[in-house]
Image (cartoon, helix red, strand yellow):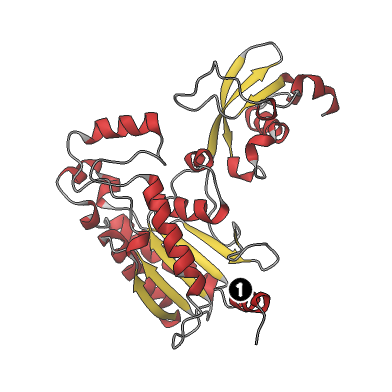
């Protein structure tokens, strides 16, 4: 009888080599956000440009997969269903299974987004995208919960089910926010890190490649050579050597090694390069003070405020 460790190793070896997250093409709502007032979010369709984008990403996928067997997973919203119908023309010969999966649908904002929705968005800005729950809708945390359920209960088991042909790759046609939350649960991002990550562009695709040298039960990493890479920006409060403070965007925040907020020296180097500053002129980097609603009178622990950067400047 196989040992538990051998069983785990066998399950890891049967995981799909790639999981590709694809955002839908340009939708009617992307082109005209007033449409949500009269048309339910799940019924929003693609524009002509969205159809062209979806067709083009299908060719990108075909070039990536070659003869790989593909399991196509689709959010049940109209715009994702239409995107899948367009892109699958290029990879039809690769597809061995197709499944409609409600757990990868868009965040529920409420049935229709009327005049009061602008006020809801204002409230969301003060509370945070991850925690704010729309009346009759969901919070980002709610979506995170269902993506975790899908990942742990379905993705990890996809090639272990008897009678199903092995899938070399999953293509998941979903939504920008949902893509971010899938990555959040996979990589253990904090809500603060999640809030720095931009939405994917229409028909952007994130290619997650299996790397069995990494720890964990689903060791995937984003391959920016094969697909797109999430943009991320943190507003950092930077103390300069002349005593002034500046709030500066720290771009490519995800490229800092986690735990990101404990490495102000690496952040200072990135800020200096991005904004044309002398590294020696940056005394401290505060990762948290740029957040809306943050109490500036509450001093962060020293490790998060550059850990004695003024004294250590000569050692950099």
Q: Is residue 312 left or right of residue 194?
A: right
Q: Secondary structure at mark 1?
A: helix
Q: Residue at x 45, y 58 (%)?
A: 148
* Residue 250 appears in view: yes
Q: Residue at x 65, y 66 (%)?
A: 211
Q: Residue 254 placed where, x, y %?
A: 59, 44
Q: Residue 99 placed where, x, y %?
A: 35, 73
Q: Residue at x 41, y 74 (%)?
A: 90
Q: Residue 42 placed where, x, y %?
A: 24, 56
Compare residues 182 and 66 and report the one nearer the observer: 182
Farthest left residue in view:
38
Q: Where is 71 relative to 113, above or below?
A: below
User: Alpha-carbon neighbours of circle 1 within 10 Å: few (<14), some, or many (≥20)?
Assistant: many
Farthest right residue in view:
315
**Occupied quadrant, residue 273:** top right
Q: Where is 189 relative to 207, above or below?
A: above
Location of mark 1 (residue) = 12
* Residue 59 appears in view: no
Q: Residue at x 63, y 28 (%)?
A: 275
Q: Quadrant of the C terminus?
A: top right
Compare residues 68 and 60 and report the one nearer the observer: 68
């Amino acid at each position: 009888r196989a040992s538990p460790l051998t069983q785990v190793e066998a399950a890891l070896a049967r995981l799909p080599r790639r999981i590709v997250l694809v955002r839908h093409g340009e939708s009617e709502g992307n082109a005209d956000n007033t449409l949500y007032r009269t048309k339910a979010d799940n019924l929003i369709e693609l524009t002509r440009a969205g159809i062209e984008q979806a067709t083009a990403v299908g060719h990108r996928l075909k070039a990536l997969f070659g003869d790989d067997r593909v399991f196509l997973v689709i959010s049940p919203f109209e715009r994702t269903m239409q995107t899948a119908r367009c892109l699958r023309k290029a990879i039809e010969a690769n597809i061995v299974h197709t499944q409609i999966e409600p757990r990868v649908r868009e965040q529920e904002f409420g049935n229709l987004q009327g005049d009061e929705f602008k006020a809801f968005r204002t409230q969301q800005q003060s509370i945070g995208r991850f925690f704010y729950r729309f009346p009759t809708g969901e919070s980002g945390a709610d979506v995170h919960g269902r993506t975790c359920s899908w990942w742990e209960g379905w993705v990890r088991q996809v090639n272990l089910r008897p009678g199903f042909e092995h899938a070399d790759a999953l293509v998941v046609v979903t939504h920008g926010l949902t893509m971010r939350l899938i990555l959040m649960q996979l990589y253990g991002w904090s809500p603060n890190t999640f809030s720095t990550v931009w939405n994917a562009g229409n028909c952007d695709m994130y290619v997650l490649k299996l790397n069995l040298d990494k720890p964990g039960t689903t060791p995937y990493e984003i391959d920016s050579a094969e697909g797109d890479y999430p943009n991320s920006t943190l507003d950092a409060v930077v103390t300069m050597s002349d005593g002034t403070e500046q709030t500066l965007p720290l771009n490519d925040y995800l490229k800092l090694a986690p735990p990101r907020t404990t490495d102000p020296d690496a952040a200072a180097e990135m800020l200096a390069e991005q904004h044309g500053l002398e590294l020696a002129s940056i005394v401290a980097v505060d990762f948290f003070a740029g957040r809306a609603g943050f109490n500036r009178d509450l001093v962060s622990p020293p490790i998060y405020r550059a850990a004695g950067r003024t004294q250590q400047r000569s050692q950099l």
